[in-house]
Amino acid sequence: MKKINLLFVCRYNRFRSRIAKAYFDKINKNKNWEAKSAGLIKGRLLKESTVKLIKKKFGLDISGKTQGLISSTLAWQKITVVVADNVPPQVFDKNKRYGKKVIVWKIKDIDKETDKGKITVAKNVIKKVDSLIKQLKRLKWTPN
């Protein structure tokens, strides 16, 4: 089986795409699947309180510098997962031309004021990643 490189993308690579990558890495048992995350635009760091909340509630580390989309990451990925309702999927229209896949999950951005809102968004992302893993196993999708 060929390696499957997944790229989780949200607007700023601050929360949704970081949650998706961290959770994917935590539960992924297939050594042929690798994930990265990036933002359409490189964002600023999350507040430490948000990083601690997600670590405490879900056991996920979403700390660190944000990443913007760069050409080497776009060349590396085989599947792009747009984890956001505010990233136009048309940005990735050329993926099909190169045998790559785009999945869109229109997840709203976090409610910056409440922990409850952050937890709700994280749970939505986690459910989608669980579904993605099941889909990858079932379809045994391999890139061209």
Image: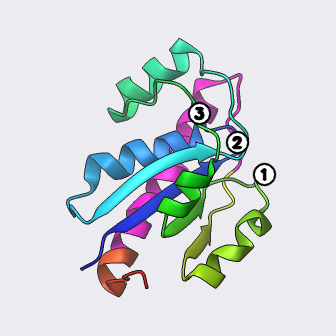
Residue topped by disc 1: 86
Q: Looking at the rendering, which quadrant does residue 44 occupy?
A: top right
Question: What is the magenta range?
Answer: 108-134
Q: Are marks 3 and 1 in contact (CB under 8 Å)?
A: no
Q: Is residue 34 left or right of residue 85?
A: left
Secondary structure that dominates the magenta span: helix
Residue at (79%, 68%) from the top-left corner?
A: 90
Q: Which residue is mark 3?
A: 118
Of pointers 3 and 2, the one earlier in the residue sequence: 2
Q: CA distance from mark 3 to mark 1?
A: 17 Å
Circle 2: element type: loop
Image quadrant in which you'd find residue 143: bottom left
Badge 2, how many Cα within 10 Å: few under 14, some, many 20+?
some
The residue that mark 2 highlights is: 109
Q: Are marks 2 and 1 in contact (CB under 8 Å)?
A: yes
Estimate the x, y position of residue 95 in percent, counting from the top left.
63, 74
